[in-house]
Amino acid sequence: MNFTYPDWWHSHGMKLHLNRAETNLEQVTLGSSTTRLIISRNEDSLNLPWNIQWAVLHFYGETAAGNRKVNHETLLTAFGFNNGTPQGSEWLINKYGGTCAEQGAFLRYKQFLNIPCPGTGNDGDPNLSLFLDTNIQQAVLNLMPNEYVLKLRGQIGKYLLLPSTPTGSKLF
């Protein structure tokens, strides 16, 4: 099955996989040989209960890394449980193309996710690209409080139109 992906998304995003040894009801960890993404509870804030940390290892040992605190809705939208874009972030969709976005948090086109921003699609960008699949969605859903799980039951893959195996070329 062939797919097209946006220019701002890096194809190494297909290499990130769920690290089951470090994923539980408190944290989701994804990684590859050059990237790492951790979603964990932020105990310091009820309004921003999730901490997203990412790191990308570049050539010559250079690293780009970041940390962002988000609310339930932002985390669920980024990981494909709805397609909303908050007011003030529409410009990202207009300029770069995509399904949904939140400035400073993510840009997503179907199952192609960038955190925290669009990139060039080439090596050296400070953002992390990730291909979402149902295993990743389920792990994120497992973090959520029960009221969110009940509302979202049966929606895994609904907004993403998930393929079985991605390969392909750029879209935008």
Image (cartoon, grey):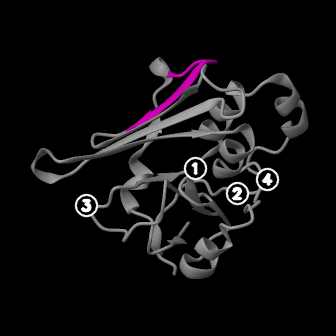
Say what amino acid the circle numbered 2 marks. Leu
Disc nearer the start of the sequence (2/1): 1
Helix or strand or loop: what does disc 2 sit on? Answer: loop
Sequence-wise, the earlier of marks 1 and 4 is 1
Q: What residue is shown at x 68% (from left), y 72% (from top)?
A: 90
Place of residue 164 in the rendered image (x, y in percent of width and height, measured from the top left): 60, 53
Which residue is the site of mark 3?
124
Instruction: Say which residue label 4 marks.
Output: 158
Q: CA distance from mark 2 to mark 4?
A: 6 Å
Q: Is residue 97 left or right of residue 71?
A: left
Mark 2 vs 3: CB contact within 8 A: no
For the residue marked with disc 4, what is the amino acid? Answer: Lys
Where's residue 36, x and y in %?
38, 37
Which of the labelled discs sits on residue 132, or is there none? Answer: 1
Task: Please state which amino acid type lies under the numbered disc 3.
Answer: Gly
Residue drawn where x is 64% and y is 47% of the image? 79
Above or below, 141 relative to 125:
above
Give the residue pinned by disc 2: 160
**For the residue carrying disc 4, how many other residues have a C-alpha within 10 Å: few (<14), some (14-19), or many (20+)?**
few
Q: Residue 158: within the magenta?
A: no
Query: At 39% from the left edge and 55% from the top edge, which residue is drawn?
Result: 127
Front disc: 4 or 3: 3
Quarter of the image where one finds residue 149: top right
Q: Amino acid at mark 1?
A: Leu
**CB atoms of marks 2 and 4 within 8 Å:** yes
Mark 4 to mark 3 CA distance (whole Å) = 33 Å
Circles 2 and 1: CB distance less than 8 Å?
yes
